[in-house]
Amino acid sequence: MNKGTVIGGGVLGSQIALVCAYHGLDTWIWLRSPASIDRAKPKLKKAFEEIMADIERADGDPARLPAGLQEPDITTKKAKEKARRALESVHLELNLEKALAGADIVIESMSEDPKAKAEMYAAMAPLLTKDQILVTNSSTLLPSMFADMTGCPERYLALHFANHIWRNNLTEVMAQPKTDPEVFDEVMTFARSISMDPVAVRKERSGYLLNSMLVPFLFSAMDLLVTGTGDVKDIDKAWVKGAGAPYGPFRMLDTIGLETARNIAHNFAAIPEEMAPFHYRDIERMLAEKIDRKEKFCD
């Protein structure tokens, strides 16, 4: 594949674009407005700075480079050069037709908002050709929900990335019932071509493999907070010290983005309270208030 287009320039969208460019793809990010471009630029810069810091930590030893930056005959010097070129080469584009033209793979990486995704697929459908592959990086929404809206259900499936994709180079490839098996194999191959380590999700499931475990974990932490059982500092400390983890759940939520967490909470808030495992409405309200105040959980 030669050209890749990412729809959305959030935390993961920016990381996906930067890693695709690092591995030699002509990479474009489609953004909705000039304000979206202004928000995407610092996210790209932050990902670049984190990549450069990880390369520095390799201390000249290419074997210590993050897995998502590995290539044959790579050196730390080459990795730095490739990262700089990647940052400089990513195209930020407002014109959807121009962003999609000639793309071998289109990666939808928008927030977990079903209405916004549906509108996006409706806009893309008449512009996509029979040779283009469309994947979604959705964390919790099933691709089958949108397959017929895309206009290319046989070439549409899920390709889910973990945060800090150059370090955590897991990708989850999940077909929906109408996905062509050959397209599924092409996406597995594409993932490997950008130094990801793909796993096949053999049955369509909201949350795939990773988020089926991660989302309940994060919501259990927020439930402890909204019920007054513990505060942010102690809940994070309990997890880090007790599980030997590098980060607590609230540090993870800050990195993932509170907007994403709020959208997931909103979807779950429809569950009757007597049947819900967590206090989703209270969690959604807490997240909305923090987003309005432009706050994070951790300093």
Image (cartoon, grey):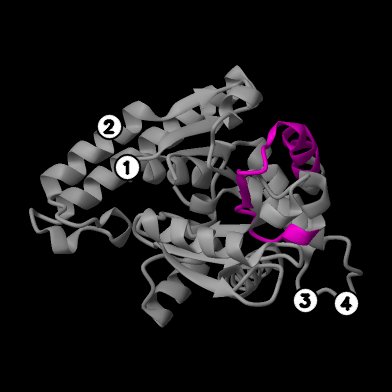
Mark 1 closeness class: few <14, some 14–19, many ≥20 residues within 10 Å: many
Dot 4: element:
loop
The answer to whether the residues at label 1 and label 2 have Cβ atoms under 8 Å apart is yes
Residue 22 location (% of width, % of height): 32, 42
Above or below, comparing residue 54 to residue 39 in the picture:
below
Residue 234 can be seen, yes or no: no
Q: Which mark is residue 277?
A: 3
The answer to whether the residues at label 2 and label 3 have Cβ atoms under 8 Å apart is no
Q: CA distance from mark 2 to mark 4?
A: 51 Å
Label 2 or label 4, whichever comes before in sequence order? 2
Query: Considering depth in this image, is 49 or 15 the residue closer to the camera?
Result: 15
Residue 240 can be seen, yes or no: yes
Residue 129 part of the magenta segment: yes
Q: CA distance from mark 4 to mark 1?
A: 46 Å
Residue range in magenta is: 117-144
Label 1 or label 2, whichever comes before in sequence order? 1
Q: CA distance from mark 3 to mark 4?
A: 7 Å
State the residue at coordinates (49%, 32%).
Answer: 28
Q: CA distance from mark 2 to mark 3?
A: 47 Å
Left of 87 or right of it: where is 189? right
User: Which quadrant would residue 202 be assigned to in this image?
Assistant: bottom right
Q: Which residue is mark 2?
A: 85
Residue 225 part of the magenta segment: no
**Hey, which residue is sitting farthest left in the picture?**
60
Q: Which residue is mark 4?
A: 275
Amino acid type, callout 1:
Tyr
The answer to whether the residues at label 4 and label 1 have Cβ atoms under 8 Å apart is no
The image quadrant where one finds the N terminus is top left
Q: Which residue is mark 1?
A: 22
Residue 178 location (% of width, % of height): 76, 63
Amino acid type, callout 4:
Met
Mark 3 closeness class: few <14, some 14–19, many ≥20 residues within 10 Å: few
